[in-house]
Amino acid sequence: MSDSYYRHKTILITGGAQGIGLGMAYRFAQEGATVIMADKDGEAGQQAEQWLQEQGHQAVFILCDVSREEEVQALLRQVGEKYKSLDALINNAGIADPFQGPLQELDMAAFDRVLTVNLRGPLLCAKNALPLLQLAEHPAILNISSTRAFMSEPDTFAYSASKGGLEALTHSLAVSLARERVRVNAIAPGWIEVGDWKKQSEKYAPQHTKEDSEQHPVGRVGQPSDIAEAALFLCSDKAGFITGQSITIDGGMTVKMIYA
């Protein structure tokens, strides 16, 4: 990226207070953007806001549960009143625990909750952010999916279904919003280590075995910065001819043949 592209740009990142979301918020802020971190975890959000502001970055936290349309509407109302337009919406918020137990014991309320947050939430955010995105010069939406959209471990029904749906929603939005000049893409992360990017009460020191690293063709586990660098590109005018696409960032895991 150029040193100036993201200056005076406004970026909204849902689930931006921890993990991959915070990693992206940090990089966009480093590039000069004003970053709005929407998150339902108030403790994490306040810590993230303070951390970024102490480094001289333009960053604010707004409490929001993306599964509730009234909260999403309030979020975008606040963004509009203060910033007038929105250059990029990054739909990162999600329930990240993929395992729900065997099918015969599946809690349907828990299943519905995952789909509501992970799939309905991005749609609600896109719907309500559209008027502000239309005011930007090069508006973009970026959905954070998962390699679990394309492959599964046992008993990951809701998470896999929600991320698969998000992949489909990405190309549907891309085609639908083309007339509004809004590009829509996705990133599908693989194993990204976020221990260093959690709130203080949940932070942990990552510990990986040799096998953990060597199962990745690139020889290591992923980091939030791996996703953030791609996000910087996809939300910029340098990616102006890219829309409706999903980029897998997993260190090569999904292209590695495994024989039992």
Image: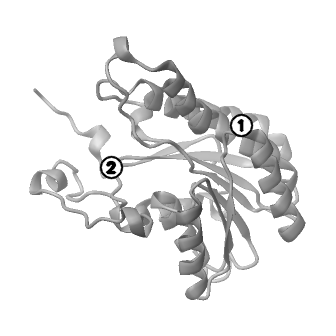
Residue 87 in the image: x percent, y percent? 75, 62
Image coordinates of residue 156 in percent, x first then y, are: 37, 28
Q: What residue lies at 31% left-to-right and 39% top-to-bottom?
A: 254
Disc 2 target residue: 191
Circle 1: is it few (<14), some (14-19), or many (20+) Cα within 10 Å? Answer: many
**Is the N terminus in the top left, top right, bottom left or bottom right quadrant?**
bottom right
Give SS at disc 2: loop
In what quadrant of the picture does the C terminus appear?
top left
Camera-side residue of 151 and 54: 54
Residue 2 in sight here: yes
Most distant residue in the top direction? 104
Residue depth check, mark 2 versus mark 1: number of the one nearer the observer:
2
Tell me, for residue 173, which label it has, or none: 1
Q: How is the image coloured?
A: one colour
Whether residues under marks 2 and 1 lie with C-beta atoms below 8 angstroms apart, the answer is no
Q: Write the residue at 53% across / 23% down.
A: 109
Element assignment for label 1? helix
